[in-house]
Image: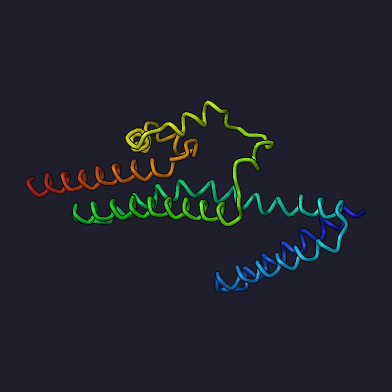
Amino acid sequence: MLRSRISHFFWFSSWVILRINQKSDSLSKSVFIAIFLGAVIGLSLHFISANHTKTIIEWYSIVGNGYVHLLKLVAIPLIFISILSAINKLENSAGIGKMSLTIVGCMLCLVMVAGFIGLLTAHVLGLDASAFVHMPSMLTTEEVNKTAAVSIPQLVTSLIPTNIFLDLTGARSVSVIGIVIFTLIAGIASVKGQKKRRRKKVRN
């Protein structure tokens, strides 16, 4: 009986959010309304027993985890298509070089900012490796030592993709940078190929 009520509540709240999204023309408005409803639902869980809360969270994780999985599904293909499309619209090679440097530079800056935030958070909260000693880890000691021993030239070399299909799956930690580099090369080759075809048409 309880699971049936939770299921009905789950689908009703999902339907309400969907209707709000359909009626609202502003994306930001829909996002803020969804955040508010999520906060209300989260606060209401404090007034429910722990056993019931666990069941409700399992149901709502379908939406949350499903949304994250869909984002992961489209993120890498979207990067590939958007960069390739932008390069194909450019006419001069100088613009391509400038765009390439801007994209790679922005990505490296974002990585540095993320690392700085991580270090700052660990320093402010007083986190250290001792908190993770008893946690199950997917990395072996040998893999950690290999990562720590990587030199700067080896790190730069690892950014160059060797298998684009492997990087499209996100299997490597630098898959996104590898895809960006491959897309830039493919885009430049495509533009140069189009220019050669135009020159041949003009000559003929």
Report the residue at 52% width, 32% height from top: 144
The image quadrant that residue 28 belongs to is bottom right
Residue placed most toward the observer, 82 or 182? 182
Report the residue at 72% width, 63% height from top: 15
Report the residue at 45% width, 46% height from top: 77
Direction from residue 18 to residue 113 in the image, left or right: left
Residue placed most toward the observer, 196 or 77? 77
Instruction: State the count of labels.
Output: 0
Q: Position of residue 189 (x, y in %)?
A: 24, 42
Direction from residue 12 to residue 84 in the image, left or right: left
Quadrant assignment for the C terminus = top left
Give the colour scheme shown: rainbow
**Residue 2, placed above or below residue 150:** below
Residue found farthest to the right: 1
Residue found farthest to the left: 203
Q: Position of residue 23 (x, y in %)?
A: 62, 73
Residue placed most toward the observer, 144 or 169? 144
Q: Position of residue 50 (x, y in %)?
A: 85, 53
Residue placed most toward the observer, 104 or 191? 104
**Residue 38, placed above or below residue 81:** below
Report the residue at 62% width, 69% height from top: 22
Q: Position of residue 44 (x, y in %)?
A: 80, 65
